[in-house]
Image (cartoon, rainbow, N blue to C red):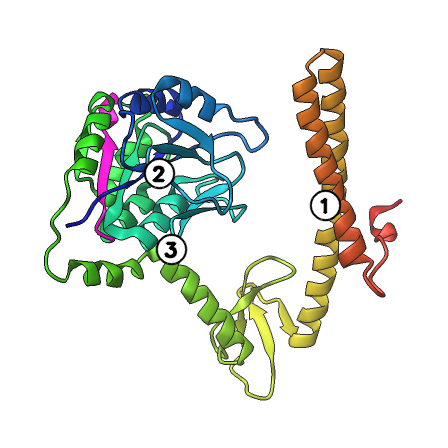
Amino acid sequence: MAIRDIIVVGASAGGVDALVQLVRGLPAGFPASVFVVCHVSPTARSVLPEILSRSGPLLATHATDGEPFLPGHVYVAPPDHHLLLAPGGTVQLTRGARENNHRPAADPLFRSAARHYGPRVIGVVLTGGLSDGAAGLLAVRTAGGVAVVQDPRDAVVAAMPRSATEIAGADHVMPLTGIARLLVTLVREPQTLQSGAGASTMATQSDDPVERASQTVEQTMAAQVRDERRGQVAAYTCPECGGALWQLDEPKLIQFRCHVGHAYDAEVLLAEQTDALEAALWTAVRTFREKGVLTQQLATRERIRGNAEAAARFEEQAAQTNRYAALIVEHVLRAGDGPAPPTTRSGT
């Protein structure tokens, strides 16, 4: 017998009200852990855990990196962090690349749950725009989990649930009012797996298309290091136009050419990449410093308004931003005989 005790939920526009209604219907002592991603501004203070805690009997908190997860608890992804499930019943927070223009995003949460917990997972996609959650829900179903989608006709914004249904399919499509009751039923009724289903579920977890793409990237990079991509598209881009580079099929040369005709010997390409990297790092330093000044300006405004909490939040952001800029300068740009600021390029 298998239990379903991990519920992953994705929502976006209209999601706060939908989540409030969902958790309101979950009973005290609910024997499953609930993980929530709702798209929020990366710089805003999220009060979603407080809202959800007031809305029902389950305690909701922002997830913290490495903490063990427990049944009867709602874990909310904090702003600007992906929430993932790790092996051993723990959560992981990362600032990995944005997906679907969001961090946090639903897809990384759903994929990690499917990868590590397979048929124990119930994936839920609620109201929202675009298609976040569709690929993740597909991973959940592929790994033997259950997919629950809010009826698009019932959603404030129909795109997310509609995309999830069209791309991943769904085991249950229903109005929001019935989802909590369904989750209680799914969690409390053990599922009988077919003989050998556990083994087949583990085999399908590696079929996650995002995971396969990541593996392909690593394999391509490794082949490039071994000089095994002659006559193929290289793992580099043209420094001048940004287009793909092809490596020439010539054993005695390491030379590249883009589709509009820019050509580079390997050492010339290396020099171009070095210059581009230095420029990018100085751009990062400049951006960090500008962000630090702007957040300090916002802190000043909030102090004048008497909003000490908001001012402290902006001041914390400013301090962190300035630390990042200083670290880049000290440990990367000026480490050892590192380069000085490109004053001739900036005109200062």
Q: Is residue 150 magenta?
A: yes
- Viewer-nearest of labels 1 and 3? 1
Residue positioned most to the front: 29
- In the image, what residue type sits under mark 1? Tyr
* SS at mark 1 in the image: helix
User: Which residue corresponds to mark 2?
Assistant: 131
* Residue at 65% across, 59% down: 240
Q: Is residue 331 above or below residue 98?
A: below
Mark 1, Cα crowd under 10 Å, few <14 / some 14-19 / many 20+, is some
Q: Nearer the viewer, residue 159 or 155?
A: 155
Where is residue 320, by image quadrant?
A: top right
Query: Any mark on residue 210, and which?
Result: 3
Q: Nearer the viewer, residue 33 or 149?
A: 33
User: Which residue corresponds to mark 1?
Assistant: 324
* Residue at 76% across, 40% down: 322
* SS at mark 2 in the image: loop
User: What segment is highlighted magenta in the picture?
Assistant: 143-154
